[in-house]
């Protein structure tokens, strides 16, 4: 495994790209850490900070994790990390799934800053099973210049089973973030993924005071065919996030997706509705629907109580885990 202590030599670049000499190699080139496009709602804030500019030390965070099947369990076989991104070494604490590593992504900083460019690459080999989360909520700090980008690329091999459920994002006042999650998913693989956004620091009267929060969640087949694209664009105006189609003037937005060949979209939708509606249907707005092409289902929740929305999301995840693996989900440990 490799870490952020990379020697000052030519780094091994991905196939088809030109190798670059120097600390970090190709990873510290803009072509690697900058997204192909930035939504105009975010890009309009582009500027040169009067502090550390884009590409400066500690402004580009990298995390690469590769998992492979080794005997009876899934193991981490490659790691590259560059501050502020890092991980806690995978844990095997689930007695029902001793083969499944639980990995926590952490940050060495206090949050995402202006001009930060963060990239996480997660690769899961054939037949692997893994759970990925974060160790704490992600804070997006106040920004006076430019914006921040957080990219996550997830690639699953044949018959892989992955759960990617990071903790919520808290956008501070005047923050500007573009978050992109791009998934490559073969037909035989299963993915449960979630995203949650809070309105801000409510105790400091920062309810929807961020400048812009843009999120793209994209899932494609290995041949490049897009099977799901979910775009969120939140640009509050004086704390107002718009009508019901935007956020319904609520404080929490949570989405849970499930892609699998092992159950129909209709069955998954019925399962999610049955798990959530009786307990949470009167306390928050939630909607369950099938994804195109019968590839899976999803549920979107908007509410005002972060703990209650978290409980609902956990209930939905537990129901899916039980249906798809025949095992109960454990209590997830946080550090």
Image: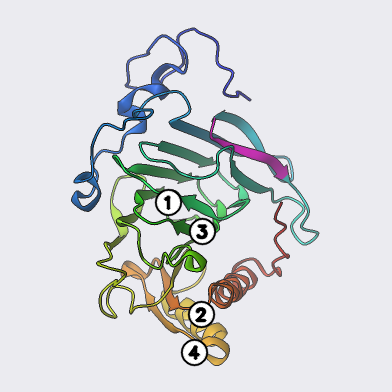
Q: Answer yes or no: do the residues labelled 2 and 3 have beta carbons within 8 Å?
A: no
- Tell me the element at label 2: helix
Earlier in the chain: of badge 1 and badge 3, it is 1
Q: Which residues are magenta?
A: 83-90
Q: Quadrant of the N terminus?
A: top right
The quadrant holding residue 74 is top right
Secondary structure state at the residue bearing disc 1: loop
Question: Residue at 53% of width from left, 81% of height from top?
Answer: 271
Q: Which residue is mark 4?
A: 281
Q: Label 1 to label 3, Cα distance in Å? A: 8 Å
Please state which of the two labelled residues, at mark 2 or mark 1, is closer to the viewer.
Answer: 2
Outermost front residue: 204
Q: Residues within 10 Å of mark 2 (few under 14, many from 20)?
A: many
Callout count: 4
Mark sitting earlier along the chain (2/4): 2
Q: Nearer the viewer, mark 1 or mark 4?
A: 4
Q: Which residue is mark 2?
A: 272
Image check: 164 left or right of 294? right
Q: Quote the CA–CA distance across marks 2 and 1.
A: 22 Å
Query: Which residue corresponds to the image point at 35% horizontal and 58% vertical from the top-left?
Result: 210
Residue 270 rendering spot, x and y as whole percentages: 48, 84
- What's the distance in space between the residues labelled 1 and 4, CA to CA? 31 Å
Instruction: Looking at this view, name the residue that lies furthest to the right.
Output: 95
- Whichever of labels 1 and 4 marks the residue nearer the N terminus, that label is 1
The Cα–Cα distance between marks 3 and 4, rounded to whole angstroms, is 27 Å
Instruction: Tell me what residue is drawn at x 27 percent, y 77 percent.
Output: 245
């Amino acid at each position: 495994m490799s870490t952020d202590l990379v020697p000052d030599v030519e780094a091994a670049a991905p196939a088809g790209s030109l190798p670059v000499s120097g600390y970090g190699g190709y990873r510290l080139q803009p072509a690697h850490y900058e997204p192909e496009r930035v939504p105009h709602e975010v890009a309009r804030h582009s500027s040169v900070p009067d502090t550390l500019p884009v590409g400066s030390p500690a402004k580009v965070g990298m995390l690469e994790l590769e998992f492979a099947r080794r005997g009876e369990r899934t193991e981490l076989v490659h790691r590259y990390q560059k501050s502020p991104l890092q991980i806690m070494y995978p844990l095997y604490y689930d007695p029902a799934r001793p083969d499944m590593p639980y990995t926590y992504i952490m940050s060495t900083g206090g949050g995402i800053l202006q001009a930060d460019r963060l990239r996480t690459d997660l690769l899961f080999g054939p037949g692997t099973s893994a759970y990925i989360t974060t160790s704490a909520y992600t804070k997006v700090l106040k920004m006076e210049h430019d914006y921040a980008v957080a990219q996550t690329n997830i690639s699953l091999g044949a018959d892989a089973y992955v759960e990617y459920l990071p903790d919520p994002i808290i956008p501070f006042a005047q923050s500007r973030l573009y978050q992109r999650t791009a998934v490559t998913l073969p037909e035989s693989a299963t993915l449960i993924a979630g995203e949650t956004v809070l309105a801000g620091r409510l105790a400091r009267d920062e309810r929807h005071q961020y400048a812009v929060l843009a999120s793209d969640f994209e899932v494609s087949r290995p041949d490049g065919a897009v099977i799901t694209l979910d775009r969120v664009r939140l640009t509050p105006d004086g704390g107002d996030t718009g009508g019901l189609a935007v956020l319904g003037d609520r404080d929490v937005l949570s989405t849970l997706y499930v892609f699998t060949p092992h159950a129909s979209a209709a069955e998954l939708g019925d399962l999610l509705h049955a798990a959530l509606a009786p307990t949470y249907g009167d306390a928050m707005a939630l909607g369950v629907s099938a994804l195109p092409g019968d590839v899976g289902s999803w549920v979107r929740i908007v509410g005002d109580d972060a703990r209650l929305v978290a409980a609902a999301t956990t209930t939905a995840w537990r129901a899916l885990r039980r249906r798809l693996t025949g095992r109960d989900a454990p209590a997830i440990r946080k550090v």
